[in-house]
Each structure stands twice: as C-alpha cells, then as structure tokens.
Image (cartoon, grey):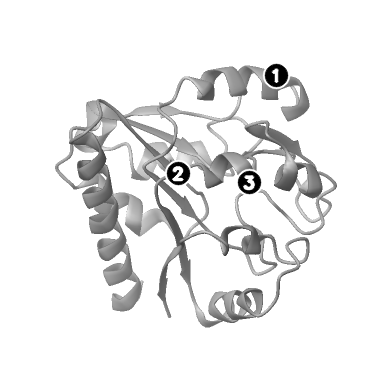
Amino acid sequence: MSEARQALAEQLAEAVFQALSEDLNRQERALLVVSGGSTPVPFFKALAAKQLPWARIDITLADERWVDEQSSDSNAKLVWENLLQGPAAEANFVALTSDAATPEEGVEDVAKRTAELPWPASVVILGMGGDGHTASLFPDSRELSLALATDEPLVAVRTPSQPQPRITFSADRLHQAHRHILHITGDDKRNVLAHAMSGDDVRKLPIRAFLSCPLAIYWAP
C-alpha cells in the first residue's frame, strides 16, 4: 500500500476517534456506520488501535451482500477480521443479515435489530464505486428509487451488475447522522466524484444523494 493511502487511513481513524470521543462525552453510547470493500481495511486497523471506550460503541454497516457471514464476500467478515480486534472487540457489532433465505424475507428482522441502535449515528463512512454507487444504491438497481425516497430504514436490493442480492440502509436513514465521510482512493474515483459534483441526476450517480449535506471527503491517490 502507498504511503499516501496509509496516511489517509491514519487521518481518517483520528477524525473518527475524535468524533466518537466527542459524542461519548455527552451520551452513553455512540454509533459508527462503516462500509465494506478493500478501501477501508487500513482505516479499520488504524481505528482498532485507538484507545476508546469500545464497550460503549455500536458498529453496523451501510449495506451488506446477502451471504453467509463467513463468506469472503461478507462485509461483516471484513469488519470482524480488521476492526473488531484487540480492545475494539468489545464494541457491539450488529450485522445486516439473518437466517432468512433472501433479503426480502429478512429485511423486517434486520430492521428490528438495527432500530435498537443509538441513532442518529455519530459518523457514517461511505465508499463509492466506479459507477457512482454508494452503500448499495446502484444506478442499475430496480430498487434505487425506493431506496432514495423511502422513510423505511432498510431496503432489499437486486442489481443486474451484482451477483448477490443485497440489503442497504436507505438514503434517508444514512442521512440521519451527525457526520458524513466519503473515503475513496485513486484517480478514477476522484474523476467520478468530480463528475458527480458537476450534475444533479441522482439516479445516474447515486453518490449525489449525499452531496447535498456536509460531506467530508478523504481521498488519496
């Protein structure tokens, strides 16, 4: 990994550490919403090394593939192996899957489980794909309009470009946070973000749904 990306991970971990510490000074528990993929791994490891009252911190995901938690495609597995390590293992992690065969069948149970988290989240950390998707808000998803408009917290998603069905927090629920951060790397992602900032069609580039609220951008080449 490049020095720039490692430095970015350390800076982001420090920012999240400060945010969680600040909120825990005035409330009993704090919620952190993270994203999957390869980009956040060094950030997860840097954050896990921070001295926080982890037993008072809840962690969940912005979205998840509807796969077994032991699958290599599972965002939960990524969190377990890279963030919930050492003292950070004391955090309360709430996964977005259940024993149901499909996300459509499981979404109600997952919604009940996540409703008990201390919303609004202290921090939501978003990623972004080369197609401008964030969480599981994909431009080619049949459920995109629903996920962008609904007051419901979670949406089951089927997307032609993706092999597995997914579950995602709705844009409305993700908006309900004290702080929003976009964590991306590489020139390609920077160019996609620049394109997103130059227009307003959310259906073409769903990351635009979060450009209307304060968004801290953490980027490295």
Q: Closer to us: mark 3 or mark 1? A: 3
Q: Callout 1 environment at 10 Å: few (<14), some (14 to 19), or many (20+)?
A: few
Residue 155 lies left or right of residue 51; in this view the side is right
Residue 93 versus residue 65 in the image, above or below: above
Residue at the disc numbered 1: 100
Amino acid type, mark 1: Ala
Query: What percent of the width, then of the height, locates residue 146?
Result: 78, 42
- Say the numbered circle drawn on residue 9: none
Q: Is residue 98 visible?
A: no
Residue at the disc numbered 3: 171
Label 2 and label 3: CA atoms lie apart by: 11 Å
Residue at the disc numbered 2: 177
Amino acid type, mark 3: Ala
Q: Callout 2 environment at 10 Å: few (<14), some (14 to 19), or many (20+)?
A: some
Query: What percent of the width, then of the height, locates residue 121?
Result: 42, 39
Label 3 and label 1: CA atoms lie apart by: 24 Å
